[in-house]
Image (tube, rainbow, N blue to C red):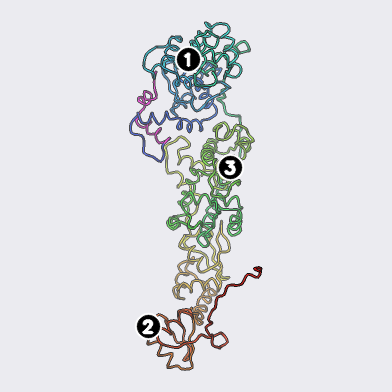
Amino acid sequence: MKTMLDFLSGLPEQRLAELAAAHLPDEPAPSGRKALAALLLDPGTVTETVAVLSLPELQVAEALSLRAAGTRRSDLAHLLGVATDDADLSLMLGRLEWHALAWPDGEWIRTAPIHEVIVGGYGFGPSARFELAQLTLDRLQRIAYNLDAPVGRDRASLLDGVCAALADAATVRAKFAAAPEATKDLLSTLANEDPFYFDPRQMGALRTNRPTALRWAVDHGLIMWNPTGMAAVLPSEVGVVLRQDLQAGAQAGFQADFDPAPPLQMPVEVSVEMVERDGAAAIRAALAHVTALLEACGRAPVPMLKDGGVGPRELRRLTKAIGGSDVDMRLWLTLVAVSGLIGITDNRIAPSAYYDDWLKLDPPAQYGELLTAWLMMDAAPLDTRSPALLRTQRDEAVSVLRRSLVSLLNGLPDGYALPSLEGINALQMYMRPLLAGAEAEEAYPTTVMLWQELELMGLGALHAPTSLCRALAAEAGLDGTPRRAALLTELERLIPAAQRTVLLQSDLTAVATGAPSAQLAAFLDLTADRESRGGGHTWRFTEASMRRAFDTGSSADELLTALREAATGGRVPQPLQYLVTDLARRHGSLRVRTVGSVLRSEDPTLLAELTRVKSLVKLGLTELAPTVYASALPAGETLAALRAAGYAPAGEHADGTIAFDRVMKHRVVPDQDRT
């Protein structure tokens, strides 16, 4: 029997590396074929692989799961109702081989432990291997002898031999034909009805040597019984053969499902220009919204809910400040989170240290990072059943379905679209049935959410892919071609380079027709108030906005120089120059200082003396008037310091009267209810 290790031994190193990377993308590859075989045989690995199979791949895998030791290709074809050399069957077996779930072994198809992942398909019982593994060596030897399988003392080879015999449809048919009539009736009932059998009287007879219909089936491996169990079971290896033969009189008998052709969806013609126009507009809007969100988080960190995530109130507040909808905001928040542009501190969301580096990138590179993060993120941001940024059980499934949808759209020819979201949903169910859902009503909401994501990211419009969608698929290798730097090239075509200058107008506005550079945007956000963003950006200079620049320490000459550098053609309108110079003349003419308390005395000499006392230096005394000095410390601390230095100060009320210290006397209030 050709094992997984034998199968891997015939593969080139590059293929082994692909298998390892597919199952351990973020970890070092297993050292050697033996370690890789152990990984691929692990039921957890098999489960993850089966989950992403297409419908026909899954149907073939389910048919293979009925025989743990493998199956002859002819028996598999017969079960699926196709010819042994059927091209679609060959294609699906090739795909399962690519996933390392099945591989050829002469006329046989050997498998990974699919039977441990897919159990009870079509109403059959579990594989014989489950119960056989619990039997004693002598019971295994008896069954092997009755099945004409090799009988030995090695438990592992003995178990493999019995399973292989039961996997042979011809062997099962021969043993059934040789069974007593009562045994045949019992087997036929279990094959067509419930495969589990429980009859206390019959089960008790199994513990004796008394011959019964059940005893004969158990001794010949046609029914599995573990003395420690409560019931006997017809294994799937036996059930599938008997059900096929017993139903053969009704047309072709029992057949497993096999639908190799995808659901028919006739593409409709669509305007490439309209698709590209809508996609380009969405890209510009998405980048503007993400940038505005990060700026808002930088100005006022966003509080999170006690149990995690961002609640509806904060989403509405951000939406009101930035634009769009609450649902859109969920996507932007998740996108900046998975891109590493925000972090959490004191249960509040604020830009991360990486955000400053991201700002220095040109807009195409900025959006490229957002796109690749979006494609690979394990999140379902538009699922409104939970707070934004809170992980759910559906995240990983939605992540696979997202890449599936990009791959699906990428397969459409230019100028064509799918007819409807219902059609897209049907294809998603065909491509990923276990993740999308078995019923259209179950899968449709997820398809709608993912399509909305594609539209918001500029990857899809009018049910067709944009050129950016094709570039993203190529970059990620979803189109089956080698990876290439297609994404950034396409983004540079779609997104203009950052503007280094703006048009300064006489009405005290600054206009940028495209996305401004990070340095230019930071300067304008300091000196002016932003009025619009998106396709164009507008700022308005006001006295209050310009005062912000002066308050940070800028001078009039520095501001005018910076404005000339930011202005297209170096021209600064006269009204803006007047605003700067006039405010510079008035800025600081009135000053405010923080003081802790004020000292007042009719004796200026006494106040002047205090400034020369070393122990009073900590007061930071400053003369405000000949009879008034300011202290940096509060009144109580100032009084204590003066008294410690030997002076006799007194407190003063706001009306100028002396504030005398009160001697506090604490008393216990008597209990009036006490008699």
Tell me the distance, in whole angstroms, between the alpha carbons under discs 2 and 3: 73 Å
Q: Earlier in the sequence, mark 3 or mark 1?
A: 1
Name the residue carrying label 2: 615
From the top left corner, tell me how far across and down residue 508 is, in percent.
Answer: 56, 70
Name the residue carrying label 1: 166
Tell me the distance, in whole angstroms, between the alpha carbons under discs 1 and 2: 100 Å
CB-based contact (under 8 Å), mark 2 and mark 3: no
CB-based contact (under 8 Å), mark 1 and mark 2: no
Nearer-the-camera pick, 375 or 516? 375
- Nearer the observer: mark 2 or 3; the answer is 2
Residue at left 49%, top 84%?
598
Name the residue carrying label 3: 451
For the magenta stretch, what is the residue range?
1-23
Q: Main secondary structure of the magenta part?
A: helix
**On screen, residue 263 above or below 662:** above
Tell me the distance, in whole angstroms, between the alpha carbons under discs 3 and 1: 48 Å
Nearer-the-camera pick, 567 or 295? 295
- Does 625 sit left or right of 81 as displayed? left
> Disc 3 residue type?
Trp
Nearer-the-camera pick, 130 or 244? 130
Count residues near mark 1 (Cα–Cα under 10 Å), then give few for <14, some for 14-19, many for 20+: many
